[in-house]
Image (cartoon, rainbow, N blue to C red):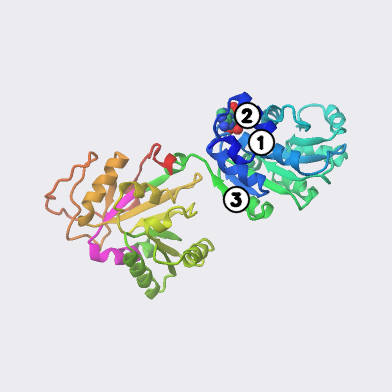
Amino acid sequence: MSFAHLGLLEPLLRTLERLDYQTPTPIQEQAIPAILKGRDMLAAAQTGTGKTAGFALPVLNTLLQEGPRVSSNSARALVLVPTRELAEQVLQSFLTYGDGLPLRSYAVYGGVSINPQMMALRKGADVLVATPGRLLDLYRQNAVTFGQLQMLVLDEADRMLDLGFADELDQVFSALPRKRQTLLFSATFSEPIRSLASNLLRDPLTIDISPRNTAAETVTQYLVGVDKKRKTALFAHLLATRGWGQVLVFAKTRNAVDGLVADLQAAGISADAIHGERPQPARLRALARFKAREVRVLVATDVAARGLDINDLPHVVNLDLPVVAEDYIHRIGRTGRAGSSGEAVSLVSADEVEQLAAIETLLGQTLVRQEEPGFEPTHRVPVTTPGGHITKKPKKPKKPKTGTTGRSKKIHLGNWFEES
Ligand code: AMP
């Protein structure tokens, strides 16, 4: 993939060539064509991913192609940032990428005299980079108006909220025309960011480039040994006794998925299914109901769940271990994201020892084992060691230990999440 394929205009391509930017970064590859098409965007991306060029290039491109010349005391694109340092840095990017273009970029921020900024704004700015407080001051003094505003970018929106800019942001938003394109960049998709996004964005494209291993470190993993035929009963028992809210459950086959859903429904627990045999609209409906919290338990196979946007769940349960060890990583990556903590619980029977050993080899650690009183297996899962070795003849079953979550431990997953 080259920049030329992303739909940028010739002068921008020449600048990129001069800067020796040979290939777009992943966020640029996804964001640039969508922004050029006029879409709103919610992107999770940190510094170092190339996110600044990811919005600066298409913003410049759009300003070149659409809209009138900028009037005095006007801005056509507004980029809100949390700090003065970031304002200068983002301005530098616009100046670099916009070199030679008939567009003016300028930055305003607090902590310095307002007068030179008021003078400079008389000429108008095609791109105005601003911290919220100083922007409001300028707006109140009529140094800037937003009648010409076409595009709004929020950069490091999570930091703006952390720094207490929520009220200022609201005041800025209420001064902007409703018809505009809005792009929201944040290091994480926290609840306040999602709520900000739902108020500001229209049908946004969501992009998530954040490194996932940071979140994965907050996932607590353990397994509960159980006889195969008692897995469903154990799951219902854990659901009832461990204070779990919504749970995403993975099962190996379509039959196992449908079986668990039917059993849960029979027990009065709302549940829905996602597997490859269900038509896409039914799968999407199940997902929507789960996200809307109309359904407590969503049961899925690996194939059907891959690529679905299900994040930030407190609990993921493996009714069966996956056949492919890497799928374990994908499954448990559905929880503990964006800094929240999560639990991944696997219900494991003796016949799954090979899969367990493969997963533990991949993780480089053995999973903590628990047993649940009343569900102790008659066939214990053979002992495994991190190298994948299985002791074929398990020792005589010891007196069952009682399981408590206190026995579980956090496992660091390193970079496994990076590739998903
Ligand atoms: P950012 O994540 O926006 O802070 O950008 C990080 C750094 O990567 C900046 O120094 C950019 O100049 C540089 N950069 C951005 N995109 C590319 C690219 N496609 N190729 C090479 N360098 C890039």
In this view, the residue in front, 168 or 14, is 14
In the rendered structure, find residue 16 and report the number of the disc placed on it. 2
Displayed quadrant of residue 352: bottom left
| Magenta region, residue range | 221-237
Q: Is residue 320 visible?
A: yes
Residue 47, relative to residue 315: is it above or below?
Answer: above
Say whether residue 224 is magenta: yes
Say whether residue 33 is magenta: no
Bin the neighbour count of mark 1 within 10 Å (Cα to Cα): few under 14, some 14-19, many 20 and up: many
How far separated are the C-alphas under marks 3 and 2? 25 Å
* Lower position in the chain sequence, tag 3 or tag 1: 1
The residue lying at 61 percent from left, 44 percent from top is 33
The residue that mark 1 highlights is 57
Q: Is mark 2 within 8 Å of ligand 1?
A: yes
The residue under label 2 is which amino acid type?
Answer: Leu
**Under tag 1, what secondary structure?**
helix
In this view, the residue in front, 284 or 62, is 62
The residue under label 1 is which amino acid type?
Answer: Leu
How far separated are the C-alphas under marks 1 and 2? 10 Å
Q: Position of residue 76 (x, y in %)?
A: 78, 41
